[in-house]
Image: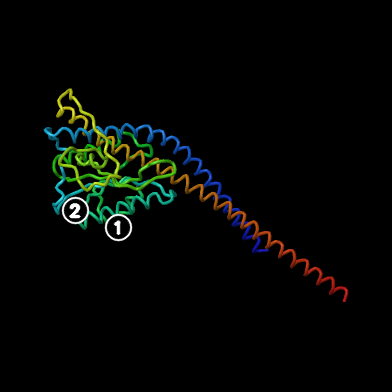
Amino acid sequence: MAKARAIVKRRKAVRNIRKITKTMQMIATAKFQKSLKRAVGTKPYSRKVRELVAELAATVGDVEHPLLRRPEEHRRDRRFALLVITSNRGLAGAYNGSVLRTAGAFIRQQGADGGHVELYVAGKKGVSYFNFQRRPIAQRVEVSDTPRFAEVQPLADLFIQRFIDGQLDAVYVAYMNFLSAGAQKPDVMQLLPLASLDQQLNIPTGRGPARAEEKKSEPKPRRHAVYEFSPEPKELLDALLPLTVRTAVFQAFLDATTSEHVSRMVAMKSATDNADKMVKALTMKYNRARQSQITTELSEIMGGVEAMKG
């Protein structure tokens, strides 16, 4: 009887856990729907701004801007800033682990090349991870669960100012890139310098002859437009380039938040399904234990009856 009671208690505990995971799945689904609208709504704008800046950087050759300076790739003492975006809470599957592994691989690669990486971490999970790894964190970024542009702008302005002052040679963001509801990819995106956007977005630069060894099967880069500037290019770039960095950081936070809700939704659905399977297995186990107990009791009764007859 004790074994059957233990199974009943365990089945009850699993059912209670299933209620919790089902509720968390429903909450994550609601948050995902809300976050998806923001991420999908702003992504075309962020993408188009970056494409526009890349085209301007490729076509305007006589205008220099500090955010467009080319990195000195052969220097051994280069300094980088890496913004790592994680979540404040767990139970999100492999979301945080994938982002942190990608960030760790980037840090090791830059360290092997002689570079120094300054860490800017958003999310309690990332802070705990790097504290455990004994890696110094330059700044802990505080952003709400629903990122707002006003919260992200000071961080982007800090990166811009430090890059212009020459304190940083490049700025990167490690985050979970939201591609679709079924696909999210951990990625390291380069924010600064903006001069490399033409290579990231496959936009022709017009600098130097074309490579003769390029394969014919490779997709041809699209032709860029010819712009007439009003006001002057320098004044226009002064307003457009910082906006590009700010929107890219904000989009990274939106993608990361949306990917977090997707991962938690999938993880909680898997937990709920596993709880259902466990309840069924425990029910079958209880039935077998109860049947065995009844058989034993019947055998004892029959044995007592036979003893009384004798």
Nearest the viewer among 219 and 310 is 219
Res 41 quadrant in image: top left
Look at discs 1 and 2 and give the one toward the viewer.
Answer: 2
Q: Position of residue 88 (x, y in %)?
A: 38, 46
Farthest right residue in view: 309
Classify mark 2: helix, strand or loop.
loop
Farthest bottom residue in view: 310
Callout 1–callout 2 Cβ contact below 8 Å: no
Q: Is residue 178 above or below residue 45?
A: below
* Quarter that holds the C terminus: bottom right
Q: Position of residue 291 (x, y in %)?
A: 72, 62
* Circle 1 residue: 133
Nearest the viewer among 224 and 115 is 224
Residue 233 falls left or right of residue 100: left
Q: Position of residue 205 (x, y in %)?
A: 19, 38
> Looking at the image, is mark 1 or mark 2 earlier in the sequence?
2
Q: Position of residue 170 (x, y in %)?
A: 20, 45
Nearest the viewer among 47 and 304 is 47
Q: Is residue 305 above or below residue 99?
A: below
Residue 286 falls left or right of residue 38: right
Classify mark 1: helix, strand or loop.
loop
Farthest top residue in view: 230
Label 1 CA crowd tier, 10 Å (few <14, some 14–19, many 20+): few
* Circle 2 residue: 115
The kind of residue tagged 2 is Gly
Residue at horizontal 56 percent and vertical 52 percent from the top: 275
Farthest left residue in view: 62
